[in-house]
């Protein structure tokens, strides 16, 4: 019989995976049943594994209209970024001071792992704010009042600037680090891309011949190195993730009633269709299928003021009304202070026709239909690709150079590698 000594919990990724899976399940069930943030309309979560760290869960939660956060006071009902009062909430105080404090970093500990160039990469300690406010970009600055202190085991005294935003009820219920943030549209999009669809960790590695092999074969092989052939695309799987996958637990999950979650980046709208919704009721929604592009076609038929503009330039004199789902002509003031530019959702060159359509949208003007986009000097071509070629927008690697130039200004390192 093997005698197992006092093994570290880190040595049992299988147990960690099972427990975490149970906890995630309990967490989502609790959110739905307890209605901590109101009636849950939809949720989406993803499990992330860091190189050596424990699994964690990023969750996006949508609540039904009556529970939507409308002002800063509503935020305070759900999210706290201050130390609780020890006298009245001792258990919560213990929990928050154990699990919900960042760092310490900054001047209190310049060697903290989050510090870069003498600044915390997570922007702690946060400044004191007397009441919760929304800044000009729609981001929330949670209330962090001065005057509350907590002394850590190592003698360092920290204040409300180090508290990671939390929900009192969730913290008390799960006794775990649960960071809760209010997401406006901009933050939700960022969150969707940063965490929910981030993809897996990659590793770079090389395979080398042993010295003996090299010695025997050096006379016959040339020294030419083909870096492209030698590149090995590897991904890193930590023991916890391996256990998670062996146990067949889901990496992503979304609310079962959410069938389609379409995020239209341009209109910044989410369309959620319920699984039990009848097809005819969806189709009967007057704005169903109406997009900024289809309305550009429609507007060009009715309003000739914008026919000399490409789709990407259209926002310079029209603005998109998200509620009405229509392009509205801007009131032109004599003194224009800011220039408006249109932005097209990124399309990877391997997407084929969609990629060429995207190129044409920055070139063709006043189109009233998809076939107008494919029309050059009165002749309509069969594909967007052919049209691009006739217009001299592709060929000689031009589309690749264009794609790289464009991606260089905004793509993440991983996206650039994938593009390459
Ligand atoms: Zn920090």
Image (tube, helix red, strand yellow):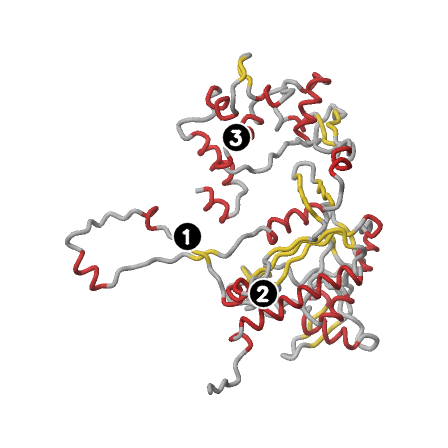
Q: Residue under label 3, please give it.
A: 353
Q: Residue under label 1, please give it.
A: 233
Mark 3 crowdedness (10 Å alpha carbons): few <14, some 14-19, many ≥20: some
Quarter location, residue 312: top right
Residue 301 percent coordinates (x, y)? 70, 18
Asked whether 376 or 74 is in front, the reply is: 376
N-terminal of the pair, mark 3 or mark 2, is 2
- At x 70% / y 25%, what residue is drawn? 317
Provide the secondary structure element on which disc 3 rests. Answer: helix
Question: Quarter containing ligand 1?
Answer: bottom right
- At x 70% / y 28%, what residue is drawn? 336
Residue 322 percent coordinates (x, y)? 75, 35
Distance in Å between CA atoms under marks 1 and 3: 27 Å
Q: Which mark is residue 55?
A: 2
Q: Nearer the viewer, mark 1 or mark 3?
A: 3
How many marks are shown on the rendered structure? 3
């Amino acid at each position: 019989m093997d005698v197992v000594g006092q093994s570290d919990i880190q040595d049992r990724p299988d147990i960690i995976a099972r427990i975490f899976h149970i906890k995630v399940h309990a967490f989502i069930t609790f959110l739905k049943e307890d209605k901590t943030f109101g009636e849950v309309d939809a949720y989406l979560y993803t499990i992330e594994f860091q190189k050596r760290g424990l699994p964690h869960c990023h969750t996006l939660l949508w609540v039904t209209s009556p529970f939507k956060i409308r002002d800063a006071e509503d935020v305070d009902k759900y999210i706290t970024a201050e130390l609780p009062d020890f006298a009245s909430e001792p258990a919560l105080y213990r929990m928050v001071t154990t699990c919900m404090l960042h760092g310490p970093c900054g001047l209190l500990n310049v060697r903290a792992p989050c510090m870069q160039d003498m600044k915390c990469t997570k922007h702690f300690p946060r400044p004191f704010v007397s009441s919760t406010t929304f800044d000009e970009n729609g981001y929330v600055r949670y209330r962090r009042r001065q005057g509350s202190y907590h002394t850590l085991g190592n003698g360092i005294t920290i204040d409300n600037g180090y508290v990671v935003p939390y929900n009192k009820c969730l913290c008390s219920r799960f006794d775990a680090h649960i960071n809760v943030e209010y997401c406006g549209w901009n933050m939700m999009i960022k969150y969707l891309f940063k965490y929910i669809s981030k993809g897996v960790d990659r590793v770079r590695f090389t395979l080398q011949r042993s010295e003996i092999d090299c010695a025997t074969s050096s006379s016959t092989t040339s020294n030419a190195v083909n870096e492209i052939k030698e590149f090995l695309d590897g991904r890193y799987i930590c023991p916890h993730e391996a256990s998670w996958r062996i146990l067949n637990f889901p990496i992503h999950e979304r609310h079962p009633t959410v069938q389609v979650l379409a995020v239209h980046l341009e209109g910044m709208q989410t369309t959620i269709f319920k699984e039990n919704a009848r097809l005819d009721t969806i189709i009967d929604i007057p704005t169903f299928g109406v997009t900024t592009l289809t309305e550009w076609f429609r507007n060009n038929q009715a309003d000739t003021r914008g026919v000399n503009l490409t789709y990407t330039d259209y926002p310079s004199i029209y603005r998109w009304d998200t509620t009405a789902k229509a392009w509205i002509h801007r009131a032109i003031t004599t003194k224009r202070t800011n220039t408006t530019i249109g932005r097209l959702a990124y399309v990877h060159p391997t997407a084929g026709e969609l990629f060429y359509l995207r190129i044409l949208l920055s070139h063709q003007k006043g189109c009233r239909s998809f076939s107008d986009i494919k029309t050059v000097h009165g002749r309509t071509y069969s594909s967007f690709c052919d049209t691009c070629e006739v217009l001299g927008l592709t060929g000689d690697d031009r589309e690749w150079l264009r794609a790289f130039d464009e991606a260089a200004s905004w793509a993440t390192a991983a996206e650039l590698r994938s593009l390459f």
